[in-house]
Every structure is written in structure tokens, then in C-alpha cells.
Amino acid sequence: MSEFQENLTKKFINKLTDCLKENKFEEALNLFEGSNYDNIIKESSWDIVPIVSSHLTTENVKCNEDLIVCCTTILNAIIEKCSPSETVLELLEQVEGPEDDIKFCVILSVLSKCLSKLNDKVKAIEWCISTIRSYIDSLPVPVNESESNTDTINKIKNVYNAVMLFLDPLVDEASLKKSQNCVTLRDYLASILIFLMGRPLCYLQEKQLQSHLEEPLPAKIVTLESQVTADMLWPLNIARIRNKKTKFKKRNVEEKCSNLKVILFELNENIPDLAYANFYFYVITKPHLWEKVPQVYDSQYIFQECIYLVIKLLQEQKCVIKGINFMDHLLKKVTRRTLTSQFLELDIYLELFDALVKVMVYCDSDKERKKALNVFQEYIEMFNMQARYFIILHLYQTSEHSGLLSLTTGIFKASIIECLEATPPIPYFLGNNLESLIKLACKLPHGSASDLVELSDEVITSLNLLRFLLIRDKHNQTGIWNLMDKLQNDFLKPLREGIDICRVHWRVKIKDLEEQKKMHKISEDIELEKSDAEVTLTVGGEKLPAMPVPEKISFCYQAVNGLDLMESILIRVNECIANNPLEQ
């Protein structure tokens, strides 16, 4: 470039800079009208684009919207005058970091026009998609109900809306209805669309997902995906690959180049687990989206391939309800009692039980805990009796929560009833199998020293199970009467001693608290402060939180009442044993 041309270029850039700073929009736009400065614009676009883009800010949207319009018009003029392949790179360079969403959204809209000028746009699409991935990854995640959270949600929606407007014409161009070519372009688009279903979108609730588009964002993404993918269920096998821990290992460059599909769909950084999980949650739970899937897949196959994705949702605190609803819909597609013990050879089936159990026990939301329980019970109903035996065995061996063990024993009892009522009787909960499970159901971890208040639920359920069996099985069809000696020594006698020990302990606590109450002359309506710490209550090795003395006394009486109920059922069980029909 000659010195004269350099001076002209410098004057042009300085004039443009000053016009934009001084809000002389008409003068700025005049620089790009006609062809007087075309050579300068072509030679200096790398300098012009950053200057113009720097004014694309949220602040200017609020205070100087005309400046935004002017800068957008200038960028559109640049793509008309300059090489589109070079302009793509110049524009993308302006959104490498999450500086401002306005800049990102405007540049995406300009990029869309720029790409329409390219004959071979695959490489440019690859660059654009890489930039979009990075920008989406940088977006914040909604935390809680607050003003800042509302701002975060709006930010996510604005960015996603801009991305959708950018992808829409590309999907239309590459859609299966319009062209059987464009295979590589379709793969890039299909991959980015599923990626968009991951964070932060997967953390938004249904009511937060409404958009100015004709349909909610997730539905829009799935609809676009269906236009570039003939079979939206084909990537389900990737879940199986990831579940088996055979994650994609880095391969040599030649293989990477020759297997783009593997790169785009198997690499976790291109499509994380949560993105697949949220994508298939919408595909499978929304009837109008499910209609877009080829209705040729076996329901058990879909169920099995989705288990890994359900687990991923259940493990994310903000996605638990999606995981539960996803599971609920999947179960409705599977016929009851069709899952056999062979399915349990795949660890994923039992891992799903473990994931549901964690939600049932530890989830903060009572509504979600109850819904998880319902799904858990429905899930068990999918298995035949032989498989159910192994499931109950697994639950006994892996559970420590008393309420869950009580639930397991209830399922055990229902299974025995079903086996006995069948013609001929089903053997899987009788004989040796019954013995294995009874030993796990009727046990005290520390013998007579066990904390029976903590174990109350499971002990009472186990006693009720024994009483049921002893009354129902007069002819030893289950084999329960063969276990009497072992049950007496390992469970019933230690339980009898444990009830007495626990009752004495809690009555002493009541006495101490009554003394404390008298000593401090405390009314039942007044909460204790210092004196609260004088008598502590412990259940399962954990101290109960501080509470007024009257509440402590009430808790102690509840504990004693629970022990009385346990003793009452134990007496009934011992009466049944004393009336052993096999000895009469």
C-alpha cells in the first residue's frame, strides 16, 4: 500500500471513529454508500469491524439505540463489499469472549447474511458453530428465585433466540426435504442443535422457556433437528457407549478426519450427557415431538438406551423432576413384567434403582421424593418375579435407610403373596430364596443394643411380614417354619431384650426432662434457652436439634409408644410360633 493510500485509509478510519463517537450517523453511513471507498473498506475491514463492533453494547441499546442501528447497517454494508470468507473470520473474532450479548446477537445476524454469499460454507459453519459452543458454555446458570436470576434467564433466552434465528435458514437450506446432499452440513447442524439442549437450557423450567419464537425453545430445537436428521433416535446408542465407560479415546489424525460423525456426536465436549438427556426428555415426553420419530423402534430398546440419560438427570439437582418425568413416560411404553433377570446382567438397570433411591431419601423437595417413590414402584412392576428377587436382594444389600428397608420388605411381602396365589405357585420367593431374603429383612445390626427407635420402620414391617407368613402358611409351603430357630436366636430374642433396654432408656430421659422442667419452673409455652442443652436426645448416633423441653418430652413418649407397638406385634409373632401347626 502506497503512502498516499495509507493516508486515505487513516483519514477514513479516523472519520468513521469520530462520526460514531459524536453520533453523526448519517455521515458515518455515507462513507459506506456508493463505491467511493470500496477499496479502502476491502483493504481495511480488519480495522473497521472492531471499531464498529465496539459500540454494540447493552448500554447503547438502552441509551443510544440509533447507534446500534447505524453499526448494524455498516456491518451489513461491509459483507456486501468484502470477501465473505474473510469477513466471517473478522466478525467471529469480535465474539470470542462473552463481553456483551448485544454484540453476539447482532454479529450472528450479520453472519447469517454473510454465509448466504458463500458457495462452500462448511468450513465457515464449522468456525461459527465452534464460536457458538464457546459462547453458550460461558453463559451463567440460574441459581434461585431473585431479580438477578430473572436477568440470567432473560440473558439465556436472548442468546438462544439469536442462535435459533442464525441456524434457521441454514437448517432450511440443508433440510432433507430440499437436498439429499449437504451431508456434512447437516451433521454439523444436528450436533450443535443437540448441544444447545445442555447447560444452561436444561436447567430452565417449562414456564421460563417461553420465547418470542412460535414455540418454546426446546421444541423449536427438536423441530429443527428433525429437519436435518431422518432418525432422531439413532444417537441413542452413544448413551450405551458412554455408559460402558468406553468413552471416545483420542484417535490418530487420519481417523478423526475420516470420521466426522464420531467427533460431532460421540465426543463429550461436543455433546455432553446432559444435552443428550434433555434432548431425549423432550423428544419422548412431548407427543407432538414424539410424532417426528420413526415409530419402528422396540420399546424395550428405547427404555434401555435412555436409562443412562435418566440417571444423568436424576443426579443433577436442578433436573431431578425432568429425570422422574422422563422415567415415568418411558415406563408407560414398556409392558409390565416383560423385563427378565437377564436384563439385570447389565449394571445400568440396578444403577437406575440406586439413583431413584437417592432422590427418594435425600431430595429436598417432598413432591419430588413422592413422585420418585411412585416411579420406583412402577419400575419394579416392569420386572418378572425372578428378576424381582434379585432386585430385592440388591436393595437389602445396598440400603441403610430404615424407611427404604421397610419399603423393600413391603415389596418382598407383596411378591410372596403373588407367588402363593399363582397356580402353580411361583418358586422365586419360596424355599431357599425366601430364607436368603428373610435373613436380610429380619436382622438387628447390633443385636439387642441396636437403636430400635431409629430402626422402628423396618423392624415393625419385618415383624408384620413374619406374622403374615406364620398365619398364612399352615403347611410350610414357603419354608418359613424351617427358619424358626435361627429367627428366634438372631432376631426375635435380641429384639425382645432390645425393646426392654430402649424402653428403660427413654423412660429415664422422660424422668430427667420432667425434673429439668420442674427445676427451672418452665411453662410448656415457653421455649428453653440455656437449659435446652442439659438433656440431649440421640437417635442413630445423631443428636436431635435443640427444641423446647415440652417437645423433647413429647418425642420421648412417641419413642416409647413406638416400642410398645413393636412389642405388641412381637407378642403376636411369638404366639403364632407357639401355635406351630406342624407340631399339632
Image (spheres, rainbow, N blue to C red):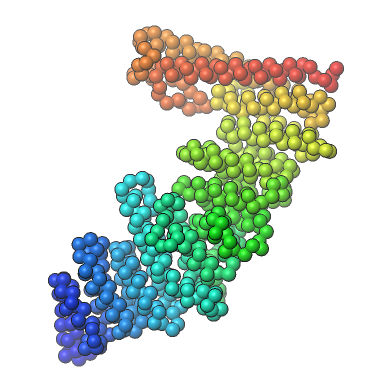
Look at the picture and state if 41 lies above or below 187.
Answer: below
Quarter of the figure with the N terminus? bottom left
Quarter of the figure with the C terminus? top right
Residue 105: x and y in percent read 33, 67
Residue 362: x and y in percent read 50, 38
Look at the picture and state if 448 lies above or below 315.
Answer: above
Foreground of the two, 5 or 17: 17
Look at the picture and state if 239 lies above or below 231.
Answer: above
Residue 147: x and y in percent read 31, 48
Residue found 68% across the figure and 21% down from its top? 492
Residue found 55% across the figure and 54% down from its top? 285
Residue found 67% across the figure and 19% down from its top? 570
Foreground of the two, 201 or 24: 24
Look at the picture and state if 521 lies above or below 412.
Answer: above
Residue found 59% across the figure and 67% down from its top? 231
Q: Is residue 66 left or right of residue 325?
A: left
Residue 444 in sight:
no
Count every numbered label the image shows and give the total.
Answer: 0
Q: Quadrant of residue 569?
A: top right
